[in-house]
Each structure stands twice: as structure tokens, then as C-alpha cells.
Image (cartoon, rainbow, N blue to C red):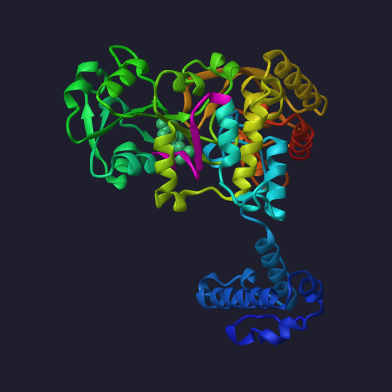
Amino acid sequence: MTLLIETPRDIPPVDEVMRDEKLEDALQTHGHAMVLRAVRNTLADVREALLMKSDATTTSAHYCCMNDLVRKVIVQLELWSKPLIQYVINATGAILHSNLGRAPLAASAAEAAYNAGRRYTTLEYNLEEGARGERTAAVEVLLKRLTAVESALAVNNNAAAVLLILATLARGREVVVSRGELVEIGGSFRIPEIMEESGATLREVGTTNKTHPDDYLRAIGDKTAAILKVNRSNFRMEGFTEEVALDTLATIAHQNGLPLIYDLGSGCLSRTLHDRIFEEPFVPDATASGADIICFSGDKLLGGPQSGIIVGRRCYIEAMRRHPLLRAFRCDKMTLAALETTLFLYLNPSRAHKEIPLLAMALADEDVLEKRVSSFINALNEADVPASMYSESSIIGCGSAPGCKLATPVVAIDPTLAPNPSTPDELLRELRTGEPLVIARAGNDRALFDLRTVFPEEEDALLQRLLRILA
Ligand SMILES: *Cc1c(COP(=O)(O)O)cnc(C)c1O
């Protein structure tokens, strides 16, 4: 049985490996088909390794026995059973982290999505009439209460919202937009390209830094279908700049019988958050300024599930509801359930501020953060791990409020002097394997942990993980 496998001819047949008693548990857990695939995979790997080896590089590492084979099969099966989308603790201080799934949902919103996923729902069912209902009715009812708009619609994301709006209102015609707003947003979302996909033609006006009312007026003609305003996400313009105020733009549009479309990017529905990070427009202000169609993301400053929300005049929204693209862009039931619950929380702002993680994190009190950080540091110091408090800043992230830095005390660890020493980069790499997974950043030769984006209930798991590695 301890026969060494030294050449491809020594590799045992698949059946023989499958009969090994050490695979009995794996067969129970993973099923015959999956174990068979793992065995074939492993044998192919071993064969390849043996064929690749030249005499010069032959070492004991190239040999294996039946036990090694079976162990490799089990490791392979464990690897395959792990989901690729794994839970992580976000200690980076970027509240909306593009690569970590943007906004975490409020517990009640996540629960609504869970329940909608597991059972039948009234997604498109009108209980009173016992007949077909409107898919986004709940979202519309809540948005009307929150922003005093005539109508509302939800789609998969804000990029889809912009495309649907332009395809519905401006296909084959022109849309006037300022050169200063032809933005590219992460993941290569470019307004000019979206415009082209929609079949509308871009009519650029003004210069990169300045656009005047006259620029818009001169561009309006027979072919004009709408004026578009795009919020400058991801960057700030400073210095010699000028843009046309939203209400002036609305007047220009309406005097010419055109709708004003406003792509807000991040949709902020919390007055308190808006006051804190003034550079992002407040959705109710935008609607009050006379924009006819406004769209924004559900998973940026709103703190809900990935979605795109369109609010505005009924006639335009009704046209979008009838557009064939809506079928391709419509949200699924879990998203709509989470979105409804998130919007519902906004009806009671103090509850929203507590329960929607994005709001709780962005509005976190600095004193409270400081207390959390110093007790975390004390616990590390007690185990002889050198750590101290640094003044840093957290960011909103995802291009929202690009100039906004939230002053934040962070835990700065010097792992080189810990009982079990390592460099900051080694520590950060180790935290990206094992459990729980932790994503943090380096700075000033330290590993930095921003507790603003760590949920209080995750704090102990993070501490224990660090102590296991360093103490
Ligand atoms: C983020 C953003 C988008 C795209 O929104 P997604 O929800 O990511 O699709 C479009 N326009 C602006 C101005 C944005 O900031």
C-alpha cells in the first residue's frame, strides 16, 4: 500500500482510489460524482507533475503514495466546497467599498430579501383584486412619501436607469449636456458611451471648467429631446469653474418644452448625512428644484441593495414602464424586498440612522469611535502587541462625496515588535486567509484598522484573530 508513485505508470486506476476507505466520509458529504471528479483531477495533476519532472530536478517532492493521493483529493474537495463569495470584516475605513460589495444592508432589509427568496411573495400580485399587480408598487409608494414625486421606478442599477431614461426619452434625437459633466465612473461607466448605446446623440456644450446658460440655449433646436445634468462623482472641480444652477437649467428646459434629466449618482435620502457631507445633493432638494426625471443608485449613499431608482413626472415614468428595455433591467424579488424595507426605514430618520449600516458608520460619533479604538488597543497591549491610536480619515467610497474625509481614530499595529513578529504586509496578507477574513490597509509602517467600518459585533472576532496571529 505504501507503494511510491514515481512514474506515470505507477499511478493507480481511478476505481482503486475511489475504493480507499479514507474517502468514505467525503463520499457521504460530497456525493459520488463530485468525489470522482476530484479523484480524476488529482490523478491528472500528479501525472502532469511526473511528466514535467526532468531528472535534474527530481526530488522526493515529486514522489507520492496512495495516502498522499487521498489527502490531495480531500483538500481539493474542501477547496471546491468553499464559496468564492466569502464574508469579510472590512477594516479599511471605506464605507462603500467597490470590491467588498458596496453597502451592507440593514438587518431588516437583509431579512426581507431572505424571506422573499425562500417563499412565494406578492411581488406582482394585487391582493385586493386577486389579480396581477405592479412589480415596483411598494418602492413607488415609499418614494412618493419620502420625496413628493409623482411616480417612481426601480431597475438593476443606476447605469441601467440612465440607459433606460435616455432610450425612452431621446432615441434618435439629441441630449444637451455640459462638457464638464461627461464623466467616467469606476468600472468604465462613461456617460458618452451610455448615450451612444441608448441611441441618443450627445450635444456637448461649454468647456471643461465653465458652462453658461447661453451655451445650453444656443444648442437647443428641433432635434433636442432633453437636457441632462450629471452629478460629478469621483472628482471635484476647484478654481476657475462655473456651472448652471439646477433651477436655472430647469427654467431653460421648460421654456423650450424639454424635460430636464438629472443623474444624481449617489442618492442621499438622509438630511443629516447631507448636512455632514454637503457635496452630495439631497434627493428631495433635487426634485424640488424642477428636474423632471432624477436617477440614483440604491447601493451608494442610500445604503440599500444594488439598484437604480428613477423618480419624477408620471408621463415620463409611464413611458419607461412600457419600454421593452425595462424587461431586461427589472429588479428581482430579493432586491425589491430589501429596497422596500430600506426605504421604509427612512420614514423614521432616527431609526434609519441606527439601522442602516452606511448611515450608522458615516454618522458615527468620534468620541464613541475613540472609546472603541482605545479599548481595542488596551486588549492588544495586554498581550504585548504594540498598538497605538493614529488620527486618520475614513472615506465614503464608490465615488460618493470624493472630497469628504471623515476624521477617524484608527488602531495602528506595529507587528514587527509583536511576540510573534511579522511585517505589516505579511500580517495583512495572513488576514486575507483563514477565518474570519479581514481586509485592512498599511500606512506609516503600520497595519491600520479603522473600526468605523467594523460592526461592533465583529470587533471581538477581529481582536481574537489578531491575537492568534501576533501574540
Ligand atoms: C455611480 C454612478 C452611476 C452608476 O451607478 P451604478 O449604480 O453603479 O450603476 C451613474 N452615474 C453617476 C453620476 C454615478 O455616480
User: Image check: 439 left or right of 460?
Assistant: left
Residue 148 sits inside the magenta stretch: yes
Give residue 72's quadrant in the image: bottom right
Residue at x 39% of width, y 24% of height: 291
Q: Is residue 90 visible?
A: no
Indicate the position of residue 294 as horizontal and vertical percent values: 43, 30
Q: Nearer the viewer, residue 429 or 19?
A: 19
User: Image check: 453 left or right of 420?
Assistant: left
Residue at x 45% of width, y 19% of height: 288
Q: Nearer the viewer, residue 468 or 123?
A: 123
Residue 342 sits inside the magenta stretch: no
Residue at x 78% of width, y 33% of height: 457
Total tally of numbered discs in the picture: 0
**Figure check: 382 above or below 340:** above
Indicate the position of residue 227 as horizontal and vertical percent values: 29, 29
Query: Within the displayed image, which quadrant is ligand 1 positioned in?
Result: top left
Q: Which residues are magenta?
A: 146-162
**Figure check: 44 above or below 458:** below
Indicate the position of residue 459 as horizontal and vertical percent values: 76, 31
**Figure check: 457 above or below 328:** above
Q: Quadrant of the C terminus?
A: top right
User: Image check: 57 left or right of 419?
Assistant: left
Indicate the position of residue 43 as horizontal and vertical percent values: 62, 78
